[in-house]
Image: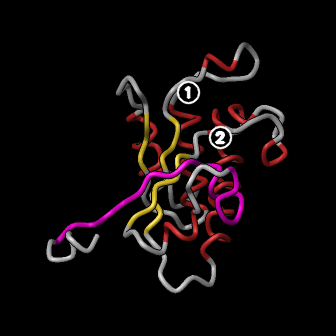
Amino acid sequence: MDELADYPVKVSADVFGITTSHAGDYENIGQDYSAISQIVDVICPMVYPSHYGRGNYHFAKPDLEPYGIIFAAMSDAKVRVSGDTKVAIVRPYLQDFTASWLGKGNYQVYGNEAVSSQIKACYDLGIESFTLWDPHNDYCYEALELMKTGRSGD
């Protein structure tokens, strides 16, 4: 970061979604959400609902609860940085892919509704930026349009 200080660039860090839910380096993965958010300009937690285990945030099947998982994870993210002197811009990665590897009944086909519900969770928390992720680059652009038009009263 010192070497980049003379340039008009922002430094960001992608972190695992689980880092938002516990203080410190909870799972010994070398990622402490609060500490990282104090030294970068943008922090990007990968809060894909499919990556949470059964029972996380009290949801039996997290992939079926995109709004609830994102709302809970990003609420925790806010707790992790409350009181910190410098806090990075938060730009979560949201799920725009189907996690069929979870097995029948444990996943849903991600489309406009599932994607827009995650975006709504961010907006409901005052988080205005996000990144959609699909490893096949097949995005639900309609979800973005739905959120643009229905945002104020939804």
Depicted 7 relative to depicted 134: above or below? below
Kindly identify which residue carries mark 1: 110
Mark 1, Cα crowd under 10 Å, few <14 / some 14-19 / many 20+, is some
- Tell me if 105 is positioned left or right of 150 in this view: right
Placement of the C terminus among the 4 image quadrants: bottom right
Q: Residue furthest top?
A: 104
Q: Quadrant of the N terminus?
A: bottom left
Rounded to the nearest whole Å, what is the CA distance between mark 1 and mark 2? 9 Å
Q: Residue at x 37, y 69 (%)?
A: 41
Residue 19's x, y, as percent?
62, 55
Magenta part of the chain: 8-27
Q: Residue at x 58, y 62 (%)?
A: 32
- The residue type indicated by label 2 comes to Pro
Closest to the observer, 139 or 17? 17
Give the residue type at disc 1: Tyr
Q: Quadrant of residue 55?
A: top right
Is 141 above or below relative to 71? above
99 relative to 114, above or below: above
Among the two numbered marks 1 and 2 on one chain, the one whose residue lies closer to the N terminus? 2
Residue 20: % across, % down: 64, 58
Task: Report if residue 6 lies within the magenta region.
Answer: no
The residue carrying pointer 2 sits among few (fewer than 14), some (14 to 19) or many (20 or more) residues within 10 Å by Cα, namely: many
Callout 1 touching callout 2 (CB < 8 Å): yes
**SS class, disc 2:** helix
Q: What residue is pinned by disc 2? A: 66
Q: For mark 1, give the secondary structure.
A: loop
